Image (cartoon, rainbow, N blue to C red):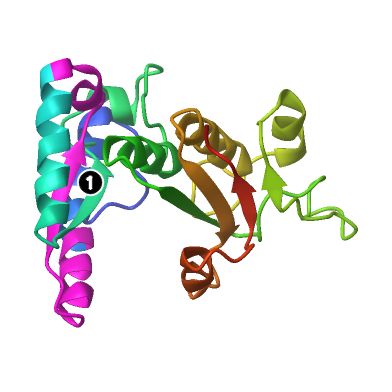
Amino acid sequence: MSLKSRPSSIRHKQAAASVGQCSIIHLYSKFFQDYDKIIGQILLSSADVTNEKKRENLINTFNTLLEMGIIPVVNANDSVSYDEIQSEEQLFGDNDMLSAVVAVLCQANKLVIFSDIDGLYDSDSHRNVQAHLISKIGRITDEMYQMAGGAGSRRGTGGMRTKLKAAQYATEQGIDTIITNGKNPSSLYGIVNGESIGTLFTGG
């Protein structure tokens, strides 16, 4: 887009989101084709989830795609939705919460959130080498948010706190949530097989 820096105005942010989405979906389609998998794109705004009729239609779309073996690739509809790119009334706010919302819409059995660390520790693992990984949590408390510290990876806008919020949203709807290290994507196989990996937040 020949921009010298990250755009600051809403219209330029939304234009950038539109261009970026094309690049992202092209990559997803290309890589999934290597595995003979078809993808479908779904762009969400808060109204799609909060409006009863739109939510019903959205759930039907998810269910139909999954029944047909098509993998939905979901993102926030930043190119047209002011709420999700700027407003304080954000429903998603970040990809962690977006994933939790999608998990609830799809009635998923589990939600896996990748982080840059192995899970939730009893203190900030970036600063304390003696921090211990917590393997299982039944209820998310205020103290856990304090343990989560500040923002994490430079690539994201949140950190462990946003992942905790997403885990809380999903578990309140009965969905087990696992936070684990994204540097080890093969750990998904262990999670599917019921192995203890990362931090498990139990739903219900």
Q: Please state if 127 lies on the left or on the right of 88 as rendered.
A: right
- Label 1, secondary structure: give it: helix
**Residue at left 53%, top 38%?**
167
Residue 203, horizontal then vertical, whole percent: 53, 37
**Residue at left 73%, top 34%?**
144
Q: Please state if 113 lies on the left or on the right of 106 as rendered.
A: right
Q: Is residue 172 above or below residue 95?
A: above
Q: Which residues are magenta?
A: 24-52
In this figure, which residue is indicated by the disc labeled 1?
16
Q: Is residue 36 above or below residue 20?
A: below
Q: Please state if 202 lies on the left or on the right of 7 as rendered.
A: right
Nearer to the camera, 98 or 104: 104
Residue 30, horizontal then vertical, whole percent: 17, 75
Nearer to the camera, 114 or 14: 114
Q: Is residue 66 above or below residue 31?
A: above
| Residue type beneath disc 1 | Ala
**Residue at left 17%, top 54%?**
66
Nearer to the camera, 133 or 87: 133
Residue 149 visible in image: no
Instruction: Give the mark count.
Output: 1
Residue 72, horizontal then vertical, whole percent: 19, 53
Nearer to the camera, 37 or 161: 37
Residue 95 visible in image: yes
Q: Toward which corner of the image does residue 150 lie, by quadrant?
A: top right
Q: Residues within 10 Å of mark 1 (few under 14, many from 20)?
A: some
Could you tell me which quadrant the N terminus lies in? bottom left
Q: Toward which corner of the image does residue 70 lie, by quadrant?
A: bottom left
| Magenta span includes 27 | yes
Seen as rendered, the residue at the extreme bottom is 34
| Magenta span includes 180 | no
